Amino acid sequence: MSEQILKVNNLNKDFKVKSTKLFQRMSSVQILKDISFELMKGETLSIVGESGSGKTTLGRCILNGIDVTSGEVIYHTKEGRDVDYLNLTKKEYQKYRKDMQMIFQDPYSSLNPRMTVYDIISEPLITNFNVKKKEVDERVADIAEKVGINPNLLKRYPHAFSGGQRQRIAIARALITHPRVIVCDEAVSALDASIQAQIINLLITLQKDLGITNMFISHDLSVVQTISDRVAVMHLGRIVELASVESIFDTPKHPYTEALLSAVPRPDPNVIRERIVLEGEVPNPARPPKGCEFHPRCPYSTEKCKIETPELQPVDRDKKHYSACHYAKELTLKGVDYGATVQ
């Protein structure tokens, strides 16, 4: 059985919103709602959903980049201890923060244009470890070579590199401290399709070679299908389905997942696929609907869905498939198929 490396328990995040009316108090919007899941050592767990579903906020909250409203993130350390990563002392945080790193979405804005590539990659190493100049040089050159950056180019500045090369630099910066967990926030969405494939293959290779655990945030389900072991589907700040990548793509158990999968493109012009177009608009997070928050756009909703909020419950315990739908065990939903061929 795989070893658990992270456990997220009832994570909630509220943001304060200024009122547009005079003398009216600030209100709060709940962006994350009772998020709970486990991350196993060596796996890739993908977080998917529409824009505004809370994917990036979840990743930053887990890394303590944003203060949470409530909840905990239990980190299983190398020494075998379980610590709440969000409530560490300053000394403990300095000890463990190098174990979890993040790769940001935009390789153009995530790199300091005033620093050389060498300085960008070496900065986390120098900050977190007491290392000599010779060892820094060796480790920077080694990680640069692993990610496909010529060590002879390390004295150049980021503007001299393409988007794909910049993302390789960002990956090298994240890996230089030998982290155990990496959060990839839309790490390939800003790249061309051919470069995306190269970066995805690089991430898969590095994971196998270095034993890294990945949390991959994306809205591109074709990429998710390639890189993931498990998938968590988010809608309006909640996880509505969680299962292995095969179960999600073959036998989804939530209508929202079915609609997302119907939009996965297939590179064959002779294939006709039936696209599920959801009617209505995405609910306002400040005023979410009662009951199941997906029910205004769900083609299978009933009166029960408008009143009761479904909890994330196991649908298939053997496959560890969870769904937050009242009718998950009754509905037969379509996964990804290749459709009908045009004659």
Image (cartoon, rainbow, N blue to C red):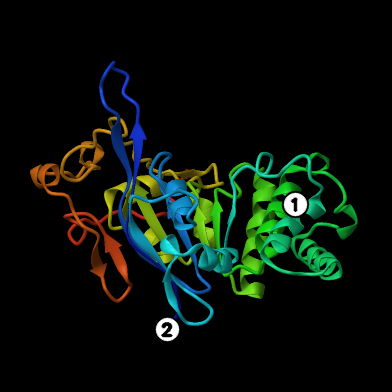
Task: Specify whether 172 is left or right of 222.
Answer: right
Residue at (41%, 42%) from the top-left corner? Answer: 50
Look at the image and tell me whether residue 292 can be seen.
yes
Q: Which mark is residue 120?
A: 1
| SS at circle 2 | loop
Upstream in sequence: badge 1 or badge 2: 2
Task: Specify whether 121 is left or right of 321.
Answer: right
Q: How crowded is the residue under tag 2: few (<14 C-alpha within 10 Å), some, or many (20+)?
A: few
Location of residue 100 by image quarter? bottom right
Q: Where in the figure is residue 274, as x and y percent of width and height?
A: 37, 42
Amino acid at the residue labelled 1 = Ile
Q: Where in the figure is residue 126, as x and y percent of width and height?
A: 73, 62
Amino acid at the residue labelled 2 = Met
Q: How crowded is the residue under tag 1: few (<14 C-alpha within 10 Å), some, or many (20+)?
A: many
Task: Specify whether 286 is left or right of 104.
Answer: left
Name the residue carrying label 2: 1
Asked if residue 21 is positioned above or below residue 214 in the image, the reply reads: above
